[in-house]
Amino acid sequence: MIVYISIGNSDDKLTQREWSNFITDLDAHLEYYADDRSAQIHGRWFSAPDDPWQNACWCVELVVDDATDVAAGLKARLRVLAAKYRQDAISWAVAETEFLSPAVGGAE
């Protein structure tokens, strides 16, 4: 199961220090799952520093046979972080992956 987890601070609810701590805390929770080999972090993305809004996104693959329990545990941790950092929500998007083979002859 591949999920995208996104957070934001476009409403400037958090100070810069709080925003930094929010990212650090969320990243630490994801690293916990990566360390016990139930997840792999495929990437982290952040809005550009000159954008008028702040966003962060992680792509995480839950790699255990039954990802349902891991997902439930991770979601529970994310809900705690949402409360700690006064967030209305944290986005959890399950990706449906489709692999596209190359065009025949490289034609567009």
Image: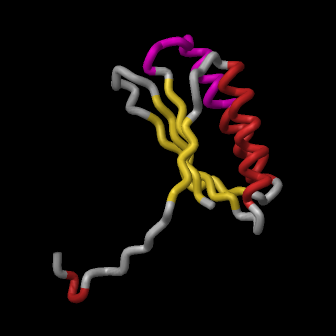
Residue under the point 58% across and 52% down: 3
Query: Which part of the image, by quadrant, shows the C terminus?
Result: bottom left
Instruction: Say if 85 sits above or below 100 in the image.
Output: above
Magenta stretch contains residue 17: yes
Picture coordinates of residue 26, whole percent (x, y): 67, 34
Which quadrant is home to the N terminus? bottom right
Name the outermost residue toward the right: 36
- Name the residue rendered at 63%, 16% in the picture: 86
Extreme-bottom residue of the structure: 105
Image-based side of 92 in relation to 106, left or right: right
83, above or below 35, in the image: above
Residue 101 against residue 16 in the figure, above or below: below
For this view, does 82 lie left or right of residue 5?
right
- The location of residue 61, given as percent across then percent down, is 63, 58
Residue at the spot x=75%, y=46% of the render? 72
Name above or below for residue 105 compared with residue 2.
below
Give residue 91's quadrant in the image.
top right
Is 44 displayed left or right of 28 in the figure?
Answer: left
Instruction: Indicate how the structure is coloured in the image.
Output: secondary structure
Q: Position of residue 81 (x, y in %)?
A: 70, 27
Give the magenta range.
10-25
- Expressed as whole percent of the image width and height from the top left, the position of residue 92 reads 57, 43
Q: How many marks?
A: 0
Residue 55 falls within the magenta-colored stretch: no
Which residue is found at the position 58% from the left and 28% from the top? 89
* Prevailing secondary structure of the magenta residues: helix
Along the viewing direction, whichever of 18 and 97 lies nearer the viewer = 97
